[in-house]
Image (tube, coloured by chain):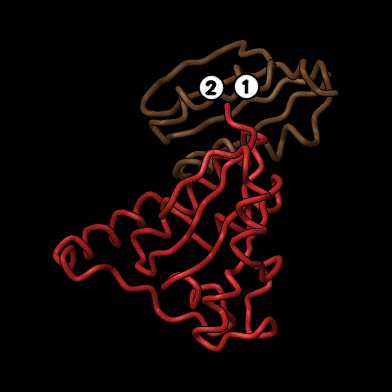
Amino acid sequence: MAKGLGIVMFSGTADKFIPLGVLTQTAANLGVPVKIFVTGFALLYFTKKKPEPRFPKEFEDFVPKIHEGLERVNAPSWYDMLKDAKDIGDVKVYVCSLMAEVVGVKKEDLDPIVDDVVGATFFMQETGDYELIFI
Amino acid sequence: MGEIKVDARGMACPGPISALIRAYRKANNGDTIEVLATDPGFKPDVQAWVKRTGNELVELTEEGGVIKAVIKVTAKK
């Protein structure tokens, strides 16, 4: 198993947050450290004023079924999964400094789940021997 | 030698494994943890977790859609 799991969280649609939560929590369960680099459209979901999650347009006919299914299986929200993962294991959430500047988000605007605002160099250095996935 | 029971029925993946870990944190070597779960992924998942952590899977059964896993805690440091 890899030394750790690095996740670049770029997408801002609700469907992509489900694997973010599941993979992070699973890695934490297995004692695998996780470092998440939040950038792109995902960044706004890590602020105190989170927007309503939205599903991608091309799958909108699936959305009611997914909502109904998630409720039926008692799936926790991605946010709760991340919080849980942080509680169980070694999970760090970093916000991309470039994207934070681009959208005018300051450190104090960020959700408490975020550990720090960092640059890509820091993230790449910290995850050099990790498996890296892009969501 | 305590016996810890975890009811993870109705929890979706990876909830039952997280529930097991919460119990495992409080357990000592020699204790057993019994987990009940309905998530169909729990059977392979608990086997993978045991393989990863080096604890002992004493029992793994399924009846009426409920999976029961009994783990003997042996790998706590």
The answer to the question of whether label 1 and label 2 lie on touching residues, with beta carbons closer than 8 A, is yes
Q: Nearer the viewer, residue B26 or A63?
A: A63
Colour representing chain A: red
Residue identifier under label 2: B48
Q: Nearer the viewer, residue A14 or A97?
A: A97
Residue identifier under label 1: B52
Looking at numbered disc 2 in the image, what kind of residue is underneath it? Ala
For this view, does A74 lie left or right of residue A81?
left
Q: Disc 1 versus disc 2: distance between alpha carbons?
A: 6 Å
For this view, does A46 lie left or right of residue B56?
left
Colour representing chain B: brown
Can residue B19 be seen here? Answer: no
Instruction: Give the x, y percent position of residue B19.
Output: 62, 40
Q: Say above or below: A15 vs B12.
A: below
Dot 1: within a 10 Å radius of its alpha carbon, few (fewer than 14), some, or many (20 or more) residues? few
Instruction: Give the x, y percent position of residue A91.
Output: 67, 51
The residue that appears at 67% across and 56% down in the rendered structure is A92
